[in-house]
Image: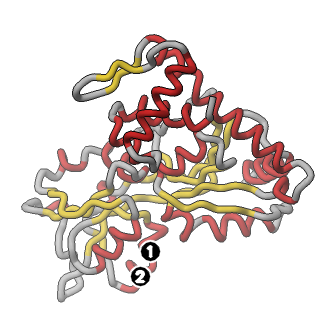
Amino acid sequence: MDLNWLEDFLALAESGNFSRAAEARHVTQPAFSRRIRALEEWAGTPLFVRGAQRATLTPAGELFARSAPAFVRSITNLRREARELGSREGAMLHFAATHALSFTFFPHWIRGIEMRAAVGAVRLVSDSMQACEELMLQGQAQFLLCHRHLAAPGRFEPRAFRSVPVGHDALVPFCAPDSEGAPRWRLEAGGVLPLLAYSSESGLGRILAAQHFKERAPGLETRFEAHLAATLLGLAREGSGIAWLPASLADQDLACGVLVRAGGAEWEVPVEIHLFRPAARQTAAAERFWSAAAMQ
């Protein structure tokens, strides 16, 4: 059995759509379908019921879905640890971090830990929250740094992953100022309010969706959608609308008057910055780092 088959299975189980799952796995749909069929032949039973609109799990597929994520992580970790034995890779730490934190938080945070403990070599992958979660679930990263809010739980089962808070931030509504330096749009004023929104791949988008701001401000209309906070920051600077941005990302623009707050404190969303790791034991270097990070 090819490990890729299980990763394909998990992608299809999550999306329920062959085209979207194939796109997520970066293969053509015919090739993806052949790999799913190969897994079913190996298992000796169908794992999906193929409908006109959606592929749903059979009872055997549901069994696979419960066990496959942990199996994929274990095999991937085993392979990495085997490769690391006897090589300098064993001391390298593998991080995934969302884009905004990669630029604003990660550099000074990692330097602060280096002042207290030896960190060694670091490999950082910066991507959307969804992509970072995939790296963790597939065992390709040892740590994930991301924003977290209790109202928007992620995809990590508490039994399989642990986390500690390592910082604080806030999502604040910003927009460009008018000629007099006042906000071009005020959330309290009502009327049509152009919204620069996050797409479904974004963890910040999940957090904001849980706040139900559109119910509080019915005039909010999505004009643009992206998964990068930096993209929305640039559009907000140009006067395209209101964007809820991490304060850590927009503070400099606020200080320079390039951006202003579009609402009062009641529109802000306090968030924590969390460091996630698998619950299973990691390499010696990763365990040393976790101990140092958790002491902050």
In which quarter of the view is residue 266 placed?
bottom left
Q: Residues within 10 Å of mark 2 (few under 14, many from 20)?
A: few
Residue 281 locus on image (x, y percent): 78, 36
Which amino acid type corresponds to the residue marked 1 in the rendered image?
Answer: Asp
Image quadrant where one finds the C terminus: bottom right
In which quarter of the view is residue 96 placed?
bottom right
- How is the protein colored in the picture? secondary structure
Q: Residue 255: which numbered mark, if any?
A: 2
User: Residue 230 or 219: which is nearer the viewer?
Assistant: 230
Element carrying mark 2: helix
The residue that mark 1 highlights is 251
Task: Kindly check if marks 1 and 2 are in contact, taking CB atoms under 8 A apart as contact.
Answer: yes
The residue drawn where x is 41% and y is 34% is: 33
User: Residue 184 or 89: which is nearer the viewer?
Assistant: 89
The residue drawn where x is 52% and y is 15% is: 63
Element carrying mark 1: helix
The residue drawn where x is 55% and y is 33% is: 5
Residue 145 locus on image (x, y percent): 59, 54
